[in-house]
Amino acid sequence: MRDQDNGVRARNRARETVSNHASDAQDHGVAALPLRGAMNPSTQAQGTSPGSFAHASDVGGPLAFSSPDTPGMPAPSSKTAWDFLPDGWRIEAVESALHAEGCAGHNHPGIGPFIRAVAPAGFEPITQLEFARLGLVTAEMRRVAEREGHLSPEQVRDEIAAGRMVIPANKAHLGFSLDPMAIGRASRTKINANMGASPVSSGTEEEVEKLKWAERWGADTVMDLSTGGDLDACRTAIIRASTVPIGTVPIYSMIIGRKLEDLTIDVILDTLEVQALQGVDYFTIHAGVLREHLSLIKDRLIGIVSRGGSLLAKWMLVHGKQNPMYDGWEQICAVMRRHDVTFSIGDGLRPGGLADATDAAQLAELSTLGELTERAWRMGVQVMIEGPGHVPFDQIEFNMKLERTLCHGAPFYVLGPLVTDIFPGYDHITSCIGATAAAYHGASMLCYVTPKEHLGLPKKDDVKQGCIAYKIAAHAADVALGIPGARDRDDELTKARAALNWQRHFELSFDPDTARAYHDEDLDVDTDFCAMCGHDWCSVRISKEIVEFASGKAEEYQREKAVRSAALTAEQQEILAKRGVLSPEEIHRLASKTRRAVGADAGAKASCHSDLVEADDAQRVQKQKLVPLNTAPAHNLPTHDPVI
């Protein structure tokens, strides 16, 4: 309770700070800030920013953390999973006034503030959705609340009961090393990393190594998309080694060793059962591709780019029948419910280029995904929806908010989207731009894209680059949405940077090895300037020296005057070697940390530390080793400025 009280006080301080900033802006003749009541993403409201311009948080409602609507955007659905209960279930009010006893965040206010479902006699809950509907908080929900930080276990339960959040946690995988997590717009934005062996590249050992690498670089879930080698062995190895949820596209296994034309509902169900028993946490099922949609594809520039979607389209054309996964949906749901496998309902007709984005085929399938969501909820199965991969920037908000309407707020899991098609080799960048917008406008999880997208199977470094690009996108969106605490680490790094505390700067960064290596590439001592600006031009140093400024004076970031960085690690050496800027000899020197080049033999202080030596000496070393600049005239300042 004390922690909750502290959190409330921090939020109140943040709101008060936002209000004060808005008043200050108006007092100084600045246009009124477009504040809508969103939380400040900084727990302590540090700095002078007014905070988020997003909507006020609506956890327990359809908006959760959301962006303001551009005119013309579809409104959120008025329905939730509470409107799609199994036959024989009913809703009752909870007489107790305690939130722990029943669900808030529902769309049935006429029944009461707290509700729960009543199942037929003898019913035993299996899925997280069923437990939540009954008003029960599971151990997995408690773990999610602990990891999220800004949600209580009861709020997690409420969001799951409403269908706006999922916890992909197969019962079998929980018996291994799975650490439960949640996907939903009330939680922080998550990222997924794809991997998997192909018929021409990689194998089980390499894929497990890539799994651990993806976990290291922040992947919240991993999809095994293997289409070659021993698929069952590879999948088993990945599940048993993973701490994150594992997803698959089961149709890949369904057609191994048989003709596509021989695919039947029995083969589909048997394959799902095998993978569910292995511990797969979520399945991509392309049940939304219907026969009537295929005529809408004929004029596309690039047809169907989903492997699952194209396989099922061919099956339907050969047999002249409806998609067997659509017709057998309730049977599929029954298998998934037994093991609490979450649906990731596939977007088999997603656009493969900007020219085909937001077309009739894509939107017709999305409408079908809404229907399938309702049917899955009636079977007690958790649902998230997969979304498009190539979308012009101006169409992203509409795509996100249309899904929110048609699928009743079920979490949206999107690939990218890429916002341009002409940068192969750099699609981790083209797509993370779109991914940032997608998350801000409603996506709950982002499927990463690597530099190898469209070109080949990603290798280890491609996985790292994809993960980092998407961690940037997810984090940027969380800050913009005003999710409490989202900006705290940014603020701490800013204070370290202002104090010119390089070691804490690197420790707080997402990839300390790369940050340290890039810094030492130009200047291999931790001084009170960097090689970008040099001593005279360092605005951060000047701001720190101005007594009236708070900048750089946070007590916890003041560094000792004699600061010497360690030698480069093996990983940092590898980073610089790949860059190719320094010679092997120069990298070896950095690894040995010889400081003669900056006037510091073993045991001595580096003479470019201007807080350790006279400014004249620091400038002398700078002129010799860095950039020979005299900037005083540019600042209209005398050499010995009395203000500083």
Image (spheres, grey):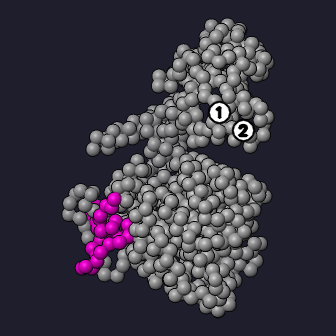
Quarter holding residue 308: bottom right
* Image mark for residue 576: 2
Q: Which residue is mark 1?
A: 568
* Image mark for residue 191: none
The residue that appears at 48% across and 33% down in the rendered structure is 46
Where 312 falls versus 499 (above or below)? below
**Majority SS type along the magenta span:** loop
Where 433 falls versus 508 (above or below)? below
The one of 184 and 499 positioned closer to us in this rendering: 499
Residue 607 falls within the magenta-colored stretch: no
Q: Position of residue 10 (x, y in %)?
A: 38, 38
Where 557 falls versus 548 (above or below)? below
Number of other residues with Cα within 10 Å of mark 2, as a class: few under 14, some 14 to 19, many 20 or more = many
Contact (CB < 8 A) between labels 2 and 1? yes
Foreground label between 2 and 1:
1
First to last magenta residue range: 112-139
Identity, as a three-letter code, of the amino acid under mark 2: Leu
Number of other residues with Cα within 10 Å of mark 1, as a class: few under 14, some 14 to 19, many 20 or more = many
Quarter holding residue 540: top right
The one of 414 and 567 positioned closer to us in this rendering: 567
Instruction: Using the rendered image of the protein, determine whether residue 494 is visible from the camera's viewpoint.
Output: no
Q: Position of residue 303 (x, y in %)?
A: 73, 75
The residue that appears at 72% across and 58% down in the rendered structure is 452
Gap in angstroms between the C-alphas marked 2 and 1 = 10 Å
